[in-house]
Amino acid sequence: MFPFGQGLSAERRTVLSVFQRNAGIRFKDISLLDLAFHHRSFSNESQEARVNNERLEFLGDAVLGMVVASCLYKDMSGHSEGDLARVKSVVVSENTLSEIAITLGIDSCLVLGKGEELSGGRQKKAILADAIEAVIGAYYLDSGYRLVDRFVLKLITPEIVKVQENRHRRDYKTLLQEYYQKRHKSCPKYELVRKTGPDHDRTFWVEVKLGETRYGPASGKNKKQAEQSAAKLAWDSIADSVSEEEL
């Protein structure tokens, strides 16, 4: 069927079987699922297999987008395109997908290069989100649209409900930017003020400036996370001082 993954060890087959059981799916071609977990850091270091999950991720991203868009179109018939787009942007975001990936146990299935492993790659949101998209792409190739549609909706429908009920994890950078642009016709400014820790375990500290007011510093394991943390500090401060209508 598919040349990659032939001769999988018994241990690896067990890992993949446990994942399928937890996810409630079954692959006809187990090598496709195995490939979905191979990060490019492994293929970059390997002399034997110069393949990774990036093509499956590309396909899975498109399938995921189609399933979610179709679901929202049917479920939110009285809402505008902008409302649908806002919900979709949250439920297919890196934050949401990485949390789903952890729930499914994708972190324990990943095949990483040594450097990525040492730098905590199994917990990196981007790698986890990419891997679940690759799984979706692999399952589409293996079993077709009907079954992958059912699989994606089982994962995503609870997240859609969270957003509709305003119970989801919020993107504070976007909230802060939309609020500040609306009120002041300007954008928040983020500044990296320091980095601490060794190269393989950095902590980044960021401040956000709104006019002459600074919030932070706040920390994160990368600059993006630190900016989100600083934005949350600013947003929480603003939310305490203005009415809900102003937000």
Image (cartoon, helix red, strand yellow):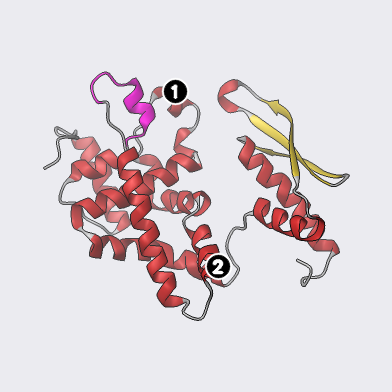
Classify the position of the C terminus by image quarter. Answer: bottom right
Question: Would you say 158 lies left or right of 170 here?
Answer: left
Image location of residue 172, percent across then percent down: 67, 53
Question: Would you say 133 lies left or right of 198 here?
Answer: left
Q: Residue at x 36, y 53 (%)?
A: 62
Image location of residue 15, percent across then percent down: 27, 42
Image disc number at residue 71: none
**Residue 112 can be seen, yes or no:** no
| Kind of element beneath mark 2 | helix
Classify the position of the N terminus by image quarter. Answer: top left
Question: Would you say 89 lies left or right of 29 here?
Answer: right
- Span colored in magenta: 38-49
Disc 2: CA contacts within 10 A as few (<14), some (14-19) or many (>=20): few
| Kind of element beneath mark 1 | helix
Closer mark to the observer between disc 2 and disc 1: 2
The quadrant in which residue 112 appears is top left
Q: Which residue is the extreme one toward the bottom?
A: 78
Q: Residue at x 53, y 74 (%)?
A: 80
Image disc number at residue 82: 2
Image location of residue 245, percent across then percent down: 77, 72
Q: Nearer the viewer, residue 105 or 162?
A: 162
**Residue 181 can be seen, yes or no:** yes
Image disc number at residue 115: 1
